Image: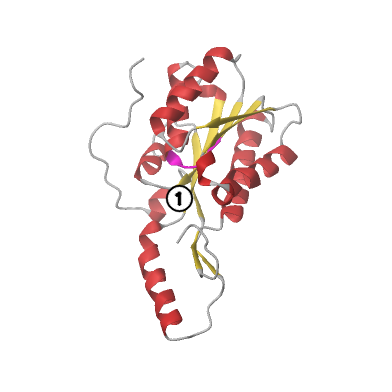
Amino acid sequence: MEIPHPNAVFLGVDNQRAGVVAGKALLKAAQTHWDGECDEMLFLDLEIAGSLPHLRLSAAQNILRNGAHKSCVLSHLDSRGEFVRSFELTRRHLQSAPKRRTLVMGINDYAVLGALRAFEEAGRNNMCLAVSYGGGPEARRELRLPNTRLMATVVFFPEKYGENLVMLALDILNKRTTPPAVYMPVQLLTRKNVADFYPHDTFAGPLTEAPNP
């Protein structure tokens, strides 16, 4: 699951496709809000995860580079997919960078949400647009906020993995023909459709906050 192994059937995310979906969503947001212009693209990596998950970012980067302004600065931060580390790295980055219209994309929801909190702290909330991956409760809650700069999250429906895994295992045990890779559904969640896919979300307690300086 998620990480391919030799001679094994793969079950997980089509990272290439997810990256294309996310890249198109962020490019559309830039076209809507900034007439397709941007000054910087900020990618929040998880380098230790290797090349397969990185396809999410590289595929999205290709979409953005082909569609956005060619002079847009490209920046990468190794967030490790962590909220606090992403917040701290983005905060430090903003302290040394001029105000720029920035397209933000991270390896998962936590990385992007941490970066968004850093933009808020710096008073640059209106200077960023973001898309994340995962579609977890934190991102779905963020999408519902009136002034969020999270334009979308690409959801992989982890709650559906179990059923697919059992069906695949039964096919293998019964020696039925199976494809080399079984990809989970990929769906773009936005403010407009998040309630359609997750109508019963309930969020208790305060929203995740950035750590104190």
In this image, 188 relative to 159: left or right?
right
* Residue drawn at point x = 64 percent, y = 39 percent: 27
User: Can you give x and y, in whole percent of width and height, for residue 145 in the image?
Assistant: 39, 34
Q: Which residues are magenta?
A: 105-109
Q: Is residue 128 left or right of residue 168?
A: right
Which amino acid lies under the numbered mark 1 shown in the image of this protein?
Answer: Asn
Q: Is residue 169 above or below residue 176?
A: above
Is residue 119 at least partly visible in the picture? no
Q: Is residue 146 magenta?
A: no
View extreme (front): residue: 6
Specify few, some or many for label 1: CA neighbours under 10 Å numbering under 14, 14-19, or 20 or more: few
| Residue hosting label 1 | 193
Residue 195 at x, y percent in the picture:
38, 50
**Percent position of residue 212, x then y:** 33, 17
Label 1 secondary element: loop
Please indicate whether residue 23 sits to the left or right of residue 66 in the image.
left
